[in-house]
Amino acid sequence: MFFVLLFQAEFALIGTLFCLLVGSYGWIKEFKMKTKRFWSVLAFTVSSFLTIFGQETIFYAGGKVGIGMPSLATDSKSTPLNEGYALRLSYYGGFAFEIQSDKILGFRTEINYSQQGGKRQGMQAIQLSNQLKGFWDLLSSKGVKHDNYMYANLKSYAIYNYLEVPFLAKCTFGSGRVFNFYLTSGPFIGFLLDAKSITKGASSIYLDKEGTDPVDKYLQGEGLSVLGLQSFNNDIDITKNLNKVNFGWQGAIGFEIILKSGKLFMDFGGNYGFAPIQKDRSNGENITDNAVVTFGYLHQL
């Protein structure tokens, strides 16, 4: 019985992944088609696991809380403006609902508040102000070569808050009496709540990423006023610049402690986005990437 159930679970997972890979073709070209294909994958996942549930099905509901370590990965288009994001600590948590059958196979869905994004610290490309855009003509007239970007030494944070709903197949290993290990895997969909770009610090402005070619050198040579240290303390709402819906794949490995009323659990996992989050991709494309550690409790209904 165990091997039959394991084969069915593997078939469902492999079939889901296959449909996802096939359906992913052309997602970058048309967002509406992406959404339709996501729901097709979701329907396949749910139906595959509902068909293998036995009669002894147990229902759970509860919550989870933890920390996330999100970053922004570059997608097919990369520029200095969207590169170099590192991990930052964030909040991750929400509600969890689980259906467990035959002590091995199960299905879990969650509603999570997830903080995506990343951080950059040090020399990085900056968006040009109108004052600096006119500076390119002066540089060109002097024969100065540049890479079309200016740089400053500062801290910047991308904070994107989502409501995420994963649909996860679950496979449990253990006796089921006190302690179990489990694996979860499946697609997720995220709905953007708000997004901010925060920058901090003061810096001179440079033509190179290494910070060896200051703009002030050329301004001074022309008898113009130098810029000096510029403040980059800004908190900008960029919600309108991002797509409202994000989706990808989520998985985790965890363990649970069985109680009379339910179970405590802890898992280690993450999710990875499949589609660029920016509406305007002229400055590069990013996808979300988030590693999470969560603790939670599920009450048996």
Image (cartoon, rainbow, N blue to C red):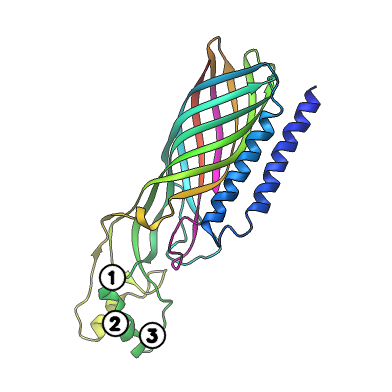
Instruction: Please identify, in this view, whether the residue under mark 2 or under mark 1 is nearer the observer.
Output: 1
Give the crowd class for mark 2: few <14, some 14-19, many >=20 residues within 10 Å.
Answer: some
Quarter of the image holding residue 59?
Answer: top right
- Mark 2 / mark 1, whichever is N-terminal: 1
- For the question of whether residue 251 can be seen, the reply is yes
- The circle drawn on residue 218 is 2
Q: What residue is disc 1 on?
A: 129
For image coordinates 43% across by 60% down, the residue present is 279
Tag 1: residue type? Ser
The residue at 34%/62% (across/down) is: 153
Q: Which mark is residue 144?
A: 3
Is residue 74 in view from this perspective? Answer: no
Front position in the image: 42 or 233: 42
Q: What amino acid does circle 3 point to?
A: Val
Where in the figure is residue 288, as x and y percent of width and height?
A: 50, 50
Local SS, label 2: helix
Closer to the camera, 218 or 282?
282
Q: CA distance from mark 2 to mark 1?
A: 17 Å
Decide which of tag 3 and tag 1 comes sooner along the chain.
Answer: 1
Please tell me whether mark 1 sits on a helix, a strand or a loop. Answer: loop
Q: Amino acid at mark 2?
A: Tyr
> Which of the marked residues, 2 or 3, is nearer the chain's N terminus?
3
Answer few, some or many: residues within 10 Å of disc 1's Cα (few below 14, many 20 plus, some between 14 and 19).
few
Range drawn in magenta? 265-288
Q: Which mark is residue 97?
A: none
- In this image, 112 relative to 132: left or right? right
Q: CA distance from mark 3 to mark 1?
A: 20 Å
Residue 265 x/y as whole percent: 54, 23
In reply to whether residue 278 is colored magenta, the answer given is yes
Give the residue displayed 34% in from the left and 90% down from the top.
141
